[in-house]
C-alpha cells in the first residue's frame, strides 16, 4: 500500500510540473515525498527559503530613527505610517503585499512599508507593537509569495 501511495504522489508531481502558463504550482515536501498543489492562474506560488525577524519602534530596534517622532507616529521609508502586525521591511518594492506561510501551516499577510540596512534578499523584518513581540518573531525557512505588486 505504501509503495502505491508513493508512486501515486510521484505521478501527480510529474503531471503537475508539465502544466503550462494557465496555473501556478506549489511543490511541498513531506519527509521524502513530494506533492504539489495546483492554484488558480491569478495566484503566484510560494517561494521557500525565506526567513523572518521582528522589530519595533524602540531605540534598540531602530537606533537613531527612533528619535523625533511627533506624536509617537512611526513612518517607514515608504512614507506610510507603520502598522504593527501588518507592516514589514523587505528588499521588495514599497507597497508589495506578501503572504507568509509558516512551518505550522498558518498564513499571515504583510505589506512592505519599510526597508532596512540588514534586510536583503529573502528576508522579511516584521513590524510589531512591542519589543517583546518583536523578539518572539524569528523563523527560518518560511515560504513567501507576492500576493499583490504595486
Image (spheres, helix red, strand yellow):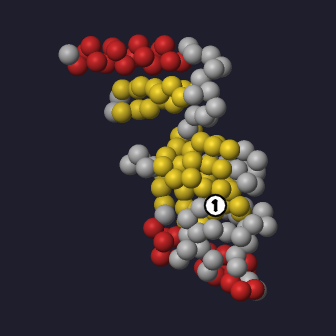
Q: Position of residue 37 (x, y in %)?
A: 47, 27
Closer to the camera in the image, 139 or 23: 23
Point 55% across, 61% down: residue: 53
Report the side of 23 relative to 120 (left or right): left
Q: Residue furthest right?
A: 79
Q: Quadrant of residue 9?
A: top left
Q: Position of residue 81 (x, y in %)?
A: 71, 70
Q: Quadrant of residue 62?
A: bottom right
Q: Position of residue 143 (x, y in %)?
A: 52, 44
Point 53% across, 40% down: residue: 48
Image quarter hosting the N terminus: top left
Disc 1 packing (10 Å; few <14; some 14–19; many ≥20)? many
Disc 1 element:
strand
Point 70% across, 76% down: residue: 74
Observer able to see residue 112: yes
Closer to the camera in the image, 38 or 51: 38
Observer able to see residue 49: no
Report the side of 86 relative to 32 (left or right): right
Q: Position of residue 115 (x, y in %)?
A: 72, 61
Report the side of 2 relative to 67 (left or right): left
Point 51% across, 25% down: residue: 38
Residue located beneath label 1 in the image: 88
Amino acid at each position: 500500500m505504501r509503495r502505491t501511495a508513493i508512486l501515486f504522489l510521484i505521478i501527480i508531481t510529474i503531471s503537475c510540473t508539465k502544466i503550462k502558463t494557465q496555473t501556478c504550482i506549489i511543490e511541498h515536501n513531506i519527509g521524502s515525498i513530494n506533492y504539489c498543489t495546483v492554484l488558480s492562474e491569478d495566484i503566484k506560488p510560494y517561494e521557500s527559503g525565506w526567513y523572518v525577524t521582528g522589530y519595533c519602534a524602540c531605540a534598540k530596534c531602530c537606533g537613531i530613527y527612533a528619535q523625533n517622532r511627533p506624536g509617537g507616529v512611526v513612518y517607514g521609508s515608504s512614507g506610510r505610517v507603520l502598522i504593527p502586525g501588518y507592516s514589514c521591511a523587505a528588499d521588495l518594492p514599497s507597497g508589495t503585499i506578501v503572504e507568509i506561510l509558516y512551518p505550522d501551516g498558518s498564513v499571515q499577510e504583510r505589506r512592505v512599508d519599510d526597508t532596512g540596512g540588514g534586510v536583503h534578499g529573502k528576508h522579511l523584518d516584521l513590524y510589531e507593537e512591542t519589543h517583546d513581540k518583536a523578539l518572539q518573531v524569528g523563523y527560518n525557512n518560511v515560504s513567501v509569495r507576492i500576493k499583490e505588486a504595486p
